[in-house]
């Protein structure tokens, strides 16, 4: 079992190992086979469930839903051949930058939309 702090990277490795596996025997293989569309639907669903739990359910439910969202996000990244390391690099790049500044810079790159 991986140590805390290593769990997400280990999970990413497990997800990658399921690529091309039997969709009948592995939920992860099924999601990967469905591509970004299938994994994206699950990310959207799990994000909604996390918000719902955060607003009116127990801490245990919030943690459970957050875990589901992180797992499905890792699968979605894998569908695009991206990894947790890619996300960590982007977060590292943003570290120490005001969130408002960073968001404004993204808005300038996307036709000025800063919402």
Image: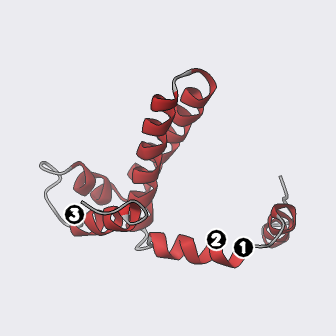
Residue in the picture at 39% in, 52% down: 71
Residue in the picture at 78% in, 68% down: 106
Q: How crowded is mark 1: few (under 14 residues within 10 Å), some or many (20 or more)?
A: few
Look at mark 3 in the image and give the residue it sits on: 18
- State the residue in front, 68 or 39: 68
Label 2 SS: helix
The quarter of the picture where residue 98 lies is: bottom right
Label 1 SS: helix
Residue 56: image location, x then y, percent:
59, 21
Direction front: furthest residue: 3
Looking at the rendered structure, which numbered label has been put on residue 43? none
- State the residue in front, 58 or 28: 58
Q: Seen in the image, is 43 located left or right of residue 10?
A: right
Residue in the picture at 43% in, 45% down: 67
CA gap between label 1 and label 2 equals 5 Å
Lower position in the chain sequence, tag 2 or tag 3: 3
CA gap between label 1 and label 3 equals 31 Å
Question: Colour scheme used in the picture?
Answer: secondary structure
Residue 22: image location, x then y, percent:
13, 57
Please determine whether, in this image, residue 93 is positioned above or below residue 9.
below
Look at mark 2 in the image and give the residue it sits on: 91
Q: Residues within 10 Å of mark 2 (few under 14, many from 20)?
A: few
Q: Seen in the image, is 26 located left or right of residue 33?
A: left
The quarter of the picture where residue 7 lies is: bottom left
CA gap between label 2 and label 3 equals 27 Å
Look at mark 1 in the image and give the residue it sits on: 94
């Amino acid at each position: 079992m991986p140590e805390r702090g290593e769990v997400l990277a280990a999970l990413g490795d497990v997800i990658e190992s399921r690529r091309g596996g039997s969709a009948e025997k592995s939920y992860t293989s099924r999601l990967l086979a469905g591509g970004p569309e299938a994994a994206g639907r699950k990310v959207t669903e799990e994000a909604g469930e996390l918000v719902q739990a955060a607003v009116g359910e127990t801490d245990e439910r919030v943690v459970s839903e957050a875990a589901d969202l992180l797992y499905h996000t890792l699968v979605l990244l894998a569908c695009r051949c991206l990894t947790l390391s890619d996300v960590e690099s982007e977060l590292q790049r943003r570290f120490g930058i005001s969130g408002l500044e960073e968001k404004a810079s993204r808005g300038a790159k996307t036709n000025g939309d800063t919402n």
